[in-house]
Every structure is written in structure tokens, then in C-alpha cells.
């Protein structure tokens, strides 16, 4: 039963992730006045990578180098099971949101370990940046999540499940409709952008200076796994935002359309930000997240404490 | 004889034998130590399996009519499981030392001290008399000092600092015990049961005992002896005491006073939470910028205490469960990490991260052990650290309210920082490029590898089958404290999650197989269009978090921390000598000023006495 839900959730997230990455490329193309790829392009990319040769750098720790993509993929799959399994199956457990946050950091950890094992200096530099990014965005993200949890908790949904968070919002209104909720939403959008490693927060990959950074030594199937993991995150993070502040998603009757609209709007927002901003340096990213963004998140927490 | 006496007497006696045996019989000495440790562990396990029998009381002496001193022992659920854990670590560390300490000096003392440490720890854990507990505690302080000095000249300063700090906390405990005797007229632990902490003197007594517990465990602001001791002490000593046994003891006392003896007021609970959260964040920030593996680990030994204090400070069953479970888990993975660091030091000759690198291939088992323990300490599911941290988060959430949000964020964010500093350690020691001088590094031998493998296995088992230790080891202790019932239904199911993770890895492997990864080709790395040799493109890990160290206000904080501005030991000596200087200035040798002091003193005395 649980395993059936697992494969279903992973399947949904992979499929949705591939579609989403196509939306991303299409919208980007439109912004840049290009035509953009056909809808099956992400699938074609993955299949093509699977057919390519795997290259392993000579002085790498090959075991860690090849196992890291598996680890990242596993983390993303488990996160999918917790998040989507909750939405379609309603089988959550107490405190599953915290588990979800942990699981969603595993892909980043895998990327770092893989890059460290690759033996390439550009990958290592990318890995340190990835780690510093993780530290930067995690602080405001956690503050926002905890604020939302406690707001729901004081409102009666005190078992901190994804399911009861959604139920709470359906009963007493979306959490975003308050000053602290709007602040939380802004912070969440920024951290999502960073978690996905998209411009302006793509310092770990930075094609022009690090030639792909963390993934620069990867090729063939391992690279395909990393790409797939990234697509899955691209699908899951907007859903997470939707669950946390925007009343969740439901799939009965007309609310399906409403859910799809929410999802697409969030995706387009991400893509537009990514296409209209320059890349920040890693120290600027750290200062931004630990400075103004964290201050904003704390302001949200304080306002929430006063019931605003 | 009572079964509680054996775990104390056997190691004490074994220590004597080890000390007496002549130098030539070194193999016999090791055998005696190992056998005694195993025997004590078996006895501790037997003690654990029995439901606590009646307390053991042996009247010893009496001073005046009121002060009875008796040797009183008692094994309740809390003591039993901690005694068991402590003795398991005893066996592992003795086994490890057989190989790690080979070729060092003062081995006769080393094994004797280890044995006596076990005896004293068992005494402190089983004591039902506060004075007896204190005696065990003091013996441990002295033994810890002696064990650190075995590290040689480099260890001297750390040993002194350790002795001064823990010794001072022991004095605080003694004072606290005197206060308690003053109030209650008894020193028997079990006669204190959820006393309300009201009124000045009760609070003072509690705080004094708390200082003793926190110093032993190494919570801020009484932490600075651990990093200093790590500089020179043998790694096996660090793995045994500050990483494992001192945590067990310190948190045992904290739990004993906070959950069993006293009923904490909201203010005190808040104070515990603040200490916990501050310890988590500040210590891990310090760990981020360390360049020596042993020092890095020692700062984590401080930081993790914060979680345990947080868990116990919540006062709700889930949180307490998490705090105690984290104590056990921490002892497991931190002991494992220190043992790995010791294996690296033994084989590569240094723990300076700059001089290490690429040891994963040379020492595969050590690498895997270190990796698992690092994931466990960073709270990556499904390892044991995640389960206990998750329970603590749940406890904090149950406390509710917006103040607990701050502690929760600190605890969650502390995990991310922990991970960051371990990424640096893993990269610089095991991944990265191997320096040419380490080309012939051998893997760790059997005696060093076995404890590492065992502890790493425990990290996995306690994570995946978390219900077993929760139900059989820690659950009874929490139930006995009267904190309330633990509801296990609906909690985190590590088994299922592990299954899912394994399934996902299997799916990934299928993708690999489809893409024929097996036929991978090895190529050189091109950087800037040229092929470089390994040494040329080595990236040292020392610069990993330079951005953090130099970021705005953090730079000043780090600089001040390096100068000891946040070290209570340095502060005490700095301002202490100022006060001494002032007093010295008063003694100027002029008769008339001494006479003036006498007159002033007399006036004050008269005023006080006449007023009363």
C-alpha cells in the first residue's frame, strides 16, 4: 500500500517536474524573444544523457562520485512520497513537515559530496558555494516555516501535519492573507529561488566562471540523475509554498483548476525572477539572506505573535 | 553481595591489578583491562535487565546526631540505562586503545585510570546519596586530569584548564548540596521528589547543581575546557570522556535534578531553553572555522549538548524523551567520530586538515564510519541523530507559543551549520586530493576498526529501528520521572522511510544500469583548457567558510572569540587578577592604614550586631 503510493508520488513528481522544466524553458524563450523547445524536450534530454558515456575523473574518489547522484535522487523521491503522498493519499504522520524540510536538503548535500569527491577544483569551489547557500537560505526559510506552523498550532492544528495545515487553512482562510503571511510569502519565493539554484542565486553552478561548478565533472547517467532530481525539486518547492501559505491543493471538482492555476502562477513567478536578474556573488547572497531577508522573516514572526 | 556493588568494585580492583603488574607483562595488563571491562559491561546489562530492586544501604559513619553518612545505592530506570551505555563505551574504548595507544608512554597508568574512571562513573550513576555522587564526580575530575596529561607536553595546558573548570563546578555542587541539606536535613537522592523550586535558597541550590551538570556536559558558558583538552589529549581519552561518558554523566545529573528532584518553574525552564539554544548555535559557529579535526569535533561535542538541554528544558514527555535519546545518540556518534579521527591521526600522523586529504581510498572503513556518524550528527534521516532531534523539535512545538519558535529555529538551523562543518571535515580528510607524503597510508587495524564499525552500525540501527531503544532504554526512565505518558502512535516511522530511501536508490541503480555506468571511462581533469596533476589543483579546506568568518559583524565576533572574550576561564582569570590587584594595593605596609581598617571593621561589626 505504502509502496504503491510511493511509486505513484514519485511518478507524479517526475512527470510534473519534466513538464515544469519545459514551462521554464518555454517562458524563458518567450522572454528572450525565441521560440523555445517542444514539450518533450526535457524527456529527450534525459534519454539522451542515459545513452552517453560515463566519464570519471582520474583523481576522483569514484565511489563517492558515483553514489552522490543516487543519494540526491533518493532524498528527492522520499520527499515526494511525504509531500505528494499527503496530498493524494492523506497518509501523513505527526510533524511530517519537519521531515519534509530535512528530506528536501538531501539533494543539496548529495551535490556537495559528489562535487567534493570529483577532485576538480571548480567543482570544489562550487561545493563550498552550495554549502554556504544552504546555510544562507535555510535560516529565513526555517523562520517562515516555524511561524506558519505556530500560527496553525495556536489556531488548533497542533499536530503539525501537512494534512492538518491544509485543513486548517481551508477552515480559517489561507495563511498568506495577513501581513505576516505576505512577508512569509516573499521570503519563501526568494528561498525557493535559492534552493533551486536559479538566477540570481546560481553562484554554485555559475557557467561563466565555474563552468557548471558542482556538476561540471558529471556526464551521462549520473548527470541525468542530478537533472532529474533538480526537475523534481522544481516541481515540489512551489507545491510546498502552496501547502504552507496558499491553502494547499485539492483535486475534487472545480478546485482542480484552482490548484493548477496556483501552481502555474508560482512557476511563472520563479521563471520571471530568474530571467530578469543578474547573478549575485556568494558573499552578496549570504549578506542578503542573513541580513534583510532574515530580518524580514523575524518581522513576520513578531507580527504573527501579535496576531497580524 | 548486592548486584549494584559489582560494577563499581570490579573495575576498581582491576585498576589496582593493572597498576601493580610489572612492566614486562604488558600483554597481560591489556588482557586484564579488556576482560574487566567486558565483565563489568555484562554485569551492567544484567543489572539493566532486572526491574530495580530495593536500594542498598550500608551505614558508615555519623557526625553529631543529625548527619548520617551512608553508602546508599539505587538503580532506577534512568540510572540503569545510563550505566549500561557507559560500560559499553568502556569496552569499546579499551579495545580501541589496544591498537591506538601502542608505543606510547605511561600505558600502565593509562589502563588503570580507564578502569577507575569506569568504577567512579558507575558509582556516581548508582549513588542514592548526594555526597556519594559528589565523591564519584570528584574522582572522575582527577582521573580526567590525569588521563589528559598522558598526551604529553602539549596536553598540559588543557589538563590544567579542565581541572580548574570542572573542579570549580564541583565546588559549586558541594555548596549546592550543603544548601539542600540545610533545607531538607537529608542527602538521600530519592527523598527529593519534585520539590517546587521556590524561595531564594532553593533556586540557588538548584542553580549550583545545574552548574555542575552543565560543566560536566560542556554546555555554554562552561564549555571551554573541551576544545582546550582536545588539543593535546589522546584521542581515545577524548572519545571516552568528553564525547561519551561526560555527556552521559552531565545529562544524567541534569535530568536527575530537573525531572526527578525538583519541579522547575517556568522561568528556570526558559533559562534552560536559552542556554540550550545559545549553546547549539554559538558552538557550531565556532566549529565552522576550526582547521584541526580534533578541535572541530570538540566544538561539536559542546554544540550537541545544547540539544539535550533543550529537550529536557521543554518539560514535555516527547521533548524529554528526545533529550535523553540524543544524549545516548550523541555518545554513539561522537565517540565514533573521535575514534575515526584517532585512526587518521595514528595512520597519517596529524589531524591538521591542511595536511590531510583523499584518505577515503586508503582507509575505506574509517571513511564510511566517519560519513555515517557525520550524517547522524547532522540529523540526516534515517540515522539516529535525526530521530532524537526530531523528538526534540516535536517537544518544542508542543510547548507552543511564539517564544518557542525562536528555540525551534535555533535547533533546526544548528543542524544545517553542523552539516556544513562536517562537509568541510569530510572533504579535507577523506575526499579531495591526497598529499604526496600520505601516499602509503595503511587502513586502520582490527582493534581500531571494530569499535568504529560497531558504533556506525548502532547509528544506523538506532535510526532505523528507533522504537526499540525508545521503548526499552529511555521510555521507562521518562515514565518514571512522572512527566506524563508518551504517545508513540503517529510518530515518525523510520522503518518505512528507510525502505522508501532504499527503494529510491534501487530505482536510481536501475537508471545507472540502463545507462551502463559500469563501463565508465577514466579521464583527466581539464581546468582552463589544460590538464593539471593532482597536487597542482589541490583546494585546501581551510578557506571553505572564509566568507562567513569575514562577513560583517561576524568578523568582530570571531576575532573576540579567538581572544577568549567568551571563555569564562579567561574572563575569570583576567578580572580575578584585577580584583586581587586591588586587594594587594590595600596592603601597603603602612601601620596607620591597617589601624584604619581595624576601626572601620569594628564600626561595621558594632553597627550590625547592635542593630540585631
Image (spheres, coloured by chain):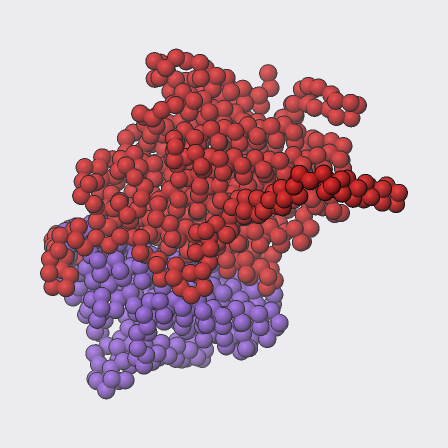
Query: Residue drawn at (41%, 35%), measured in percent from left and top?
Result: B155
Q: Position of residue B584 (x, y in %)?
A: 62, 41
Question: Residue B602 in the image: x percent, y percent?
Answer: 81, 40
Number of numbered callouts drawn: 0
| Left-right relation of B368 to B41 | left
Image quarter where the C terminus of chain B lies is top right
The residue lying toward the viewer, choosing from A234 and B511, is A234
* Residue A105 occupies quadrant: bottom left
Residue at the extreme bottom of the image, as rendered: A33
Residue drawn 50% across and 24% down? B116
Q: Quadrant of residue A212?
A: bottom left
Percent coordinates x, y for residue A127 in the rendering: 29, 59
Vertical position of residue B585 compared to residue B49: above or below? below
Q: Residue at x 67, y 54 (%)?
A: B267
Residue at left 65%, top 34%?
A: B174
Chain letter for purple, please: A
Q: Nearer the viewer, residue A150 or B313?
A: B313
Query: In the picture, which quadrant includes the N terminus of chain B?
Result: top right
Where B85 falls versus A18 (above or below)?
Answer: above
A104 left or right, relative to B226: left
Asked if residue B418 is positioned above or below residue B368 in the image, the reply reads below
Q: Is residue B494 visible?
A: no
Spot the red chain and give its letter.
B
User: How far across and down, in percent of the image, does residue B459 sit?
Assistant: 40, 42
Q: Is residue B117 visible?
A: yes
Amino acid at each position: 500500500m505504502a509502496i504503491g503510493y510511493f511509486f505513484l508520488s514519485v511518478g507524479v513528481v517526475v512527470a510534473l517536474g519534466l513538464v515544469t522544466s519545459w514551462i521554464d524553458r518555454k517562458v524563458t524563450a518567450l522572454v528572450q524573444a525565441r521560440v523555445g523547445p517542444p514539450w518533450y524536450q526535457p524527456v529527450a534530454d534525459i534519454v539522451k544523457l542515459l545513452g552517453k558515456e560515463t566519464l570519471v575523473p582520474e583523481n576522483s574518489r569514484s565511489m563517492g562520485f558515483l553514489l552522490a547522484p543516487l543519494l540526491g535522487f533518493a532524498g528527492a523521491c522520499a520527499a515526494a512520497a511525504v509531500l505528494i503522498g499527503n496530498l493524494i493519499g492523506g497518509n501523513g504522520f505527526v510533524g511530517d513537515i519537519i521531515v519534509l524540510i530535512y528530506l528536501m536538503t538531501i539533494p543539496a548535500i548529495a551535490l556537495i559530496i559528489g562535487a567534493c569527491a570529483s577532485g576538480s577544483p571548480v567543482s570544489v569551489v562550487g561545493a563550498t558555494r552550495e554549502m554556504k547557500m544552504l546555510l544562507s537560505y535555510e535560516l529565513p526559510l526555517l523562520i517562515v516555516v516555524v511561524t506558519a506552523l505556530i500560527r496553525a498550532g495556536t489556531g488548533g492544528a497542533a499536530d503539525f501535519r501537512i494534512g492538518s495545515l491544509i485543513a486548517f487553512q481551508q477552515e480559517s482562510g489561507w495563511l498568506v492573507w495577513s501581513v505576516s503571511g505576505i512577508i512569509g510569502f516573499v521570503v519563501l519565493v526568494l528561498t525557493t529561488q535559492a534552493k533551486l539554484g536559479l538566477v540570481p542565486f546560481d553562484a554554485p553552478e555559475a557557467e561563466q566562471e565555474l563552468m557548471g561548478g558542482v556538476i561540471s565533472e558529471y556526464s551521462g547517467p549520473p548527470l541525468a540523475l542530478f537533472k532529474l532530481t533538480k526537475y523534481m525539486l522544481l516541481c515540489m518547492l512551489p507545491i510546498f509554498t502552496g501547502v504552507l501559505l496558499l491553502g494547499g491543493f485539492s483535486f475534487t471538482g472545480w478546485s482542480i483548476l484552482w490548484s493548477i492555476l496556483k501552481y502555474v502562477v508560482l512557476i511563472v513567478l520563479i521563471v520571471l525572477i530568474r530571467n530578469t536578474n543578474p547573478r549575485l556573488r556568494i558573499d552578496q547572497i549570504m549578506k542578503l539572506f542573513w541580513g534583510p531577508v532574515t530580518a524580514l522573516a523575524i518581522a513576520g514572526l513578531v507580527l504573527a505573535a501579535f496576531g497580524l | 553481595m548486592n548486584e549494584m556493588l559489582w560494577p563499581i568494585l570490579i573495575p576498581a580492583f582491576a585498576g589496582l591489578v593493572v597498576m601493580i603488574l610489572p612492566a614486562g607483562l604488558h600483554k597481560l595488563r591489556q588482557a586484564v583491562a579488556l576482560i574487566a571491562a567486558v565483565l563489568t559491561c555484562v554485569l551492567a546489562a544484567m543489572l539493566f535487565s532486572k526491574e530495580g530492586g530495593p536500594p542498598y544501604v550500608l551505614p558508615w559513619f555519623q557526625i553529631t546526631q543529625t548527619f548520617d553518612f551512608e553508602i546508599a545505592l539505587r538503580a532506577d530506570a534512568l540510572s540503569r540505562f545510563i550505566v549500561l551505555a557507559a560500560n559499553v563505551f568502556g569496552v569499546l574504548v579499551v579495545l580501541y586503545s589496544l591498537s591506538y595507544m601502542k608505543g606510547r608512554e605511561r600505558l600502565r597508568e593509562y589502563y588503570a585510570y580507564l578502569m577507575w574512571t569506569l568504577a567512579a562513573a558507575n558509582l556516581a550513576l548508582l549513588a542514592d546519596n548526594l555526597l556519594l555522587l559528589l565523591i564519584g564526580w570528584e574522582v572522575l575530575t582527577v582521573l580526567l586530569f590525569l588521563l589528559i596529561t598522558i598526551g604529553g607536553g602539549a596536553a598540559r595546558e588543557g589538563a590544567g584548564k579542565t581541572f580548574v573548570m570542572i573542579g570549580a563546578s564541583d565546588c559549586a555542587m558541594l555548596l549546592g548540596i550543603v544548601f539542600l541539606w540545610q533545607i531538607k536535613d537529608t542527602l538521600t537522592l530519592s527523598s527529593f521528589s519534585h520539590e517546587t523550586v521556590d524561595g531564594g535558597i532553593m533556586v540557588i541550590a538548584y542553580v549550583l547543581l545545574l552548574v555542575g551538570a552543565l560543566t560536566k556536559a560542556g554546555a555554554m558558558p562552561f564549555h571551554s575546557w573541551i576544545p582546550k583538552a582536545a588539543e593535546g589529549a589522546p584521542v581515545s581519552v577524548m572519545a571516552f570522556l568528553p564525547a561519551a561518558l561526560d555527556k552521559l554523566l552531565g545529562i544524567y545529573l541534569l535530568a536527575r535534578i530537573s525531572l526527578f528532584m525538583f519541579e522547575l518553574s517556568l522561568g528556570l525552564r526558559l533559562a534552560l531553553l536559552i542556554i540550550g539554544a545559545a549553546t547549539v548555535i554559538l558552538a557550531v559557529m565556532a566549529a565552522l572555522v576550526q582547521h584541526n579535526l580534533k578541535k572541530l569535533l570538540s566544538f561539536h561535542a559542546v554544540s550537541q549538548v545544547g540539544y539535550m538541554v533543550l529537550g529536557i528544558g521543554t518539560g514535555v514527555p516527547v521533548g524529554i524523551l528526545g533529550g535523553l535519546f540524543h544524549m545516548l545518540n550523541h555518545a554513539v556518534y561522537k565517540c565514533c567520530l573521535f575514534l575515526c579521527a584517532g585512526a587518521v591521526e595514528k595512520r597519517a600522523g596529524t589531524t591538521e586538515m591542511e595536511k590531510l586529504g583523499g584518505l577515503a581510498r586508503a582507509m575505506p572503513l574509517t571513511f564510511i564510519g566517519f560519513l555515517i556518524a557525520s550524517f547522524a550528527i547532522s540529523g540526516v534521516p534515517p540515522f539516529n541523530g535525526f530521530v532524537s532531534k526530531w523528538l526534540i523539535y516535536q517537544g518544542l512545538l508542543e510547548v507552543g507559543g511564539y517564544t518557542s519558535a525562536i528555540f525551534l529555529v535555533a535547533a533546526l538551523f544548528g543542524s544545517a551549520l553542523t552539516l556544513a562543518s562536517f562537509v568541510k571535515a569530510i572533504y579535507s580528510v577523506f575526499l579531495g586530493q591526497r598529499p604526496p607524503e600520505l601516499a602509503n597510508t595503511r587502513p586502520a587495524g582490527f582493534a581500531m576498526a571494530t569499535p568504529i564499525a560497531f558504533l556506525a552500525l548502532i547509528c544506523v540501527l538506532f535510526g532505523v529501528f528507533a522504537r526499540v531503544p525508545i521503548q526499552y532504554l529511555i521510555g521507562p526512565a521518562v515514565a518514571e520521572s512522572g512527566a506524563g505518558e508518551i504517545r508513540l502512535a503517529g510518530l515518525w516511522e523510520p522503518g518505512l522511510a528507510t525502505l522508501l530511501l532504499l527503494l529510491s536508490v534501487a530505482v536510481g541503480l536501475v537508471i545507472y544500469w540502463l545507462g551502463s555506468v559500469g563501463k565508465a571511462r577514466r579521464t583527466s581533469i581539464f581546468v582552463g583548457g589544460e590538464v593539471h596533476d593532482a597536487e597542482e589543483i589541490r583546494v585546501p579546506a581551510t578557506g571553505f567558510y572564509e566568507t562567513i568568518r569575514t562577513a560583517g559583524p561576524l568578523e568582530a565576533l570571531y576575532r573576540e572569540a579567538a581572544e577568549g572574550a567568551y571563555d569564562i576561564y579567561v574572563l575569570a582569570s583576567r578580572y580575578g587578577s584585577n580584583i586581587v590587584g586591588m586587594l594587594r594595593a590595600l596592603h601597603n605596609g603602612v601601620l596607620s592604614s591597617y589601624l584604619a581598617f581595624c576601626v572601620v571593621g569594628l564600626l561595621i561589626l558594632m553597627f550590625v550586631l547592635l542593630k540585631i
